Image: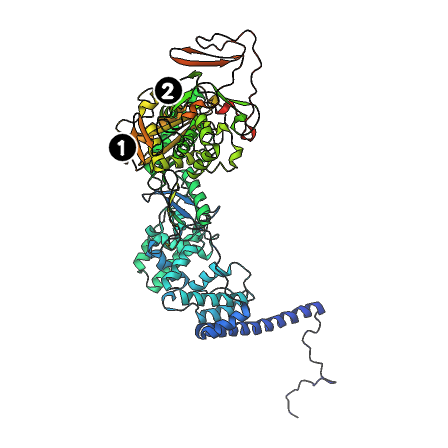
Amino acid sequence: MSGTSRRPTPSGPAPPRRRVGAGVHPAVLTRRLARGARRRSRLHLAALAAAALAIATVLVWGGGQAALALLDARLGAVPDSRRLPADSVVLDRHGQVIAVLHARGERRVPVALAQISPELRRATVAVEDRNFWHEGAVDGSRLVAAAWTDLVHGGPVQGASTITEQLAKVLYVGTSPRTVERKLRQILIARQLARTLSREQVLEEYLNDINYGHGAYGAEAAARTYFGVAAAQLDLAQAALLAGLPNSPALLDPFHHPDAARARQRAVLAAMVDTGAVTAAAAAAAQAEAPALAAGSMGDLDLFPTVTARAVREVRERLGLDAVTAGLRITTTVDSELQRFSQAAVTRQVDAMAAQHAGDGALVAVDPRSGEVLAHVGSAGPGHPAEQVNMAAQPRSPGSTFKLFTYSAALQARRLSMVTPIRDRPYSLAGGGGGGGGRYQVHDYDPWYRGTVTVKEALASSLNVPAVKAEMLTGIPEVVRVAQGMGVTTLDRPASAYGASLTLGGYPVPLEELAQAATVFAAEGWFRAEHLLLSVHDRRGGELLARRAGHRALDPGATFVMNTILADDANRAPAFGTGSALTIPGHLVAAKTGTTSEFRDNLTVGWTPRLALATWVGNADDSPMRGTTGLSGAAPIWNEVMSHALGTAADGWPAPPAGVERVAGGWVLEGTSAETGAEAGALEELAPQADCRQWSRDGGLLWACGPTRSGLAGDPGPPPAPSPSPEVPQKEGGAGFSLSFTLGR
């Protein structure tokens, strides 16, 4: 036996081998097994998804139309791109930007690729898709690697998108939950974008639509929001900072997270160096620069709010587009210099009339040769009651400016000539001329009646009685038809609904439509639709606006006679004196004023062949002014702006047209004479009343009714036993008359 000892061998059977999971709580074991199963499933899914993405990429990349059709059958047809809101730029006729329109909380100003800094283009490609210029729509190797990594680690499909894929997501896919199916659709659409767009077009679309944070979408909006410059002016440091923001606009916001934004900027510059887009020295210099940030907002530019609002309205009416979100380049007909001058003139006059309780004013200037609006002032401006209201578009009583339509209709219908005698004396007619009961008593602006006058004197002096007689002789339906043909849209009821107060301004008309009518007189009877839009281009530069043809609205002979009457200062001298605010030295201008009762509205409308101009002074709440007329209230604005706009250029009045001939005292249309319409002087006169009297004084005729003396010089007083005054019906239904429309000047 040797001396070496041995370890005793244990007796009995060997102990059993410990099983996996022995002694572990069943619930814990279940969770472990489930995790293992999920991991194996995820690996399997990852393999399948990666394979599917790889196969899909190969098919889409090289399978042509058959592959696309196969994917379409599985995923459905490619949808229309999402309509992304884009800012519209509004310019004046000379190309000056006067407003930028945008959706609430979003700014997007599409620009051409050439208008985006080369530094931003290079920075974006370097950090987002360095193979952009020589790859297709999808980078297959990056796509499969990213899908495998994300699925193995339990996350959704993400990352590795090319710029083309990102554009497909922005325009078509949106922010739906990220799935393998959505990724396949994104690949499909990216492939189709690559087939239909050049690389430059893809990059331009991307840089115009990507989110940079702070409500700025696209490079132009981002450059203006963060640095207050155009995208074309970005330097390398600014471009590198912007190029990093789309990765996570909120977390990289340089206003709230400047350190994160600067770190991302460094990564962008490093990528640019790595791809050879910039030198290391240039990147270091840019990194050392700390770009000064702007206010974090583009600011809201709107120099002429009334003009902007009207431009938006016309785009909607003519093109069916929302100018605020359509990304348009809207060039208006407005002349900014004349607009500013006109606004200042309106404001000055309204402020000067504070003692007369004038709160606001408005003005519309139009080129009669084209219908282009050159200035549109809707109120007296900030600090005035109607600051937010466009009073030029509000229907108001036109006062005696409506006589323009009455006499035009009468002349065109050959019912009167400019030399027809017509009696200005107390006058009434049954039912207000509209078929109602009672009698409508017509009053002139003042109680002084002129006896027999000619039509040219009656119109230029704005006498009411002759105007109503001319209206009755011509017929209200014909007056309505002529007014409508010259652009008045508010007369939209049957002609039988209007009473004799029509010619005195009894029915409202917007100031801008009075300006439109003035262009017809200035353009020898031609109607050219008044408009504010000169051109409208979409974001790709295509013209959207179609031209509209004009048409003849008034007989050229009638137009010539109206111009002759209203441009002759001698015709209005008896009522307004000579050299009033309706005359402009060095120019021959036609003009007509209007005033409504209680001085609620003052108007002046006037024109030459080069310019039609309408002005208004009053109160938006319809409260009366004190002691002011169209001549004293609105005409000073008209005179100042017209004088400024006309300058020293010739007026360009045309020669008399065919169909008119000169007679003693004026011009008449063929088929008329000095006696034409003489029956107007024999129309029904005021029915005799016991409490009405008339008397002569200083060669004129005065008239008054009532049981007491009027206070007028020479009033003989009421007769001993006056009878009741005749009934004066109300204006409802157009059959009666309200004193709110009796003033003539």
Q: How is the image coloured?
A: rainbow
What's the residue type where badge 2 is placed? Ala
The image position of residue 528, as x and y in percent, is 37, 42
Residue named by callout 2: 575
Residue named by callout 1: 647
Task: State whether residue 352 is above or below residue 327.
Answer: above
Please count the marks in the image.
2
Q: In the depicted view, which residue is nearer to us: 420 or 49? A: 420
Quadrant for the C terminus, please. Answer: top left
Question: Of helix, strand and loop, which one carries label 2?
Answer: helix
Task: State whether residue 471 is above or below residue 125.
Answer: above
Question: Of helix, strand and loop, which one carries label 1?
Answer: loop
What's the residue type where badge 1 is placed? Gly
Quadrant for the N terminus, please. Answer: bottom right
The image position of residue 692, as x and y in percent, is 51, 13
* Left or right, 259 with reference to 148: left
Residue 384 visible in image: no
Crowd tier of the residue under label 2, counting other residues whose Cα lies within 10 Å: few below 14, some 14–19, many 20 or above: some
The image position of residue 291, as x and y in percent, is 36, 49
Q: In the depicted view, which residue is nearer to us: 73 or 248? A: 73
Residue in the image at 50% along x and 61% along y: 173
Residue 393's disc number: none
Crowd tier of the residue under label 1, counting other residues whose Cα lies within 10 Å: few below 14, some 14–19, many 20 or above: few
Residue 686 visible in image: yes
Task: State whether residue 129 is above or below residue 625.
Answer: below
